[in-house]
Image (cartoon, rainbow, N blue to C red):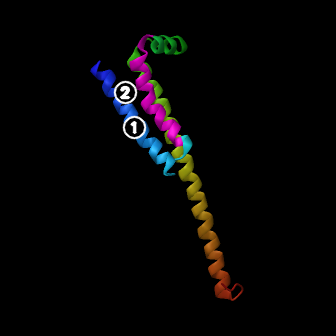
Amino acid sequence: MSSLLFVTGFCLLYIFVLFWNAVSKHLSLIDFLMLSAVALLPVAFEWFPETFNQLTAMLTNVETPFVLLAGTLFVVVFAFLYRIVVLIENLKQTNTMLVQELSLLRHQAAQGEVSF
């Protein structure tokens, strides 16, 4: 019972902090949903152990609850990591384009072609 209260309390606190960051525009809705899944999966295993374990065991042919929980958490974390990598790559491309545009503008300003 104490682990149930601890996991539920942590989940509620964690989701409240995530929600507060999402409302204050520090976190996007997609990030909020993905990070919430990290907290909600252990709660699902704690609150509905038989139902959740049987359903996931039937879908994956794995019977150990810890392996199922760890596997689903890894999927969520890797999806979030992939999203971060894509965002960083887009920022890198945007940064390269901006540096190139700035270099062209400085070159044109040095030639006297463009006035600011």
- Categorize mark 1 by other alpha carbons within 10 Å: few (<14), some (14-19), many (20+): some
Q: Main secondary structure of the magenta part?
A: helix
User: Is 76 one of the magenta-colored residues?
Assistant: no
* 75 relative to 46 in the view: left or right: right
**Residue 85 image point, x, y percent:** 52, 47
Tell me the kind of residue under disc 2: Thr
What is the C-alpha distance between the residues marked 1 and 2? 10 Å
Report the residue that reaches farthest toward the bottom.
112
N-term mark: 1 or 2: 2
Whether 26 is drawn above or below 61: the answer is below
Where's the N terminus, which quadrant? Answer: top left
**Residue 18 image point, x, y percent:** 45, 42
Where's the C terminus, which quadrant? Answer: bottom right
Mark carried by residue 66 = none
In this view, the residue in front, 60 or 40, is 40
Q: Would you say residue 80 is visible in this rendering?
A: yes
Q: Would you say residue 61 is visible in this rendering?
A: no
**Badge 2 is on which residue?**
8
**Residue 91 image point, x, y percent:** 56, 57
Tell me the kind of residue under disc 1: Tyr
* 99 relative to 20 in the view: left or right: right
**Badge 1 is on which residue?**
14
Which stretch did the figure color magenta? 31-50
Whether 63 is drawn above or below 73: the answer is above
At 52% across and 10% down in the image, what residue appears? 58
* 60 relative to 5 in the view: left or right: right
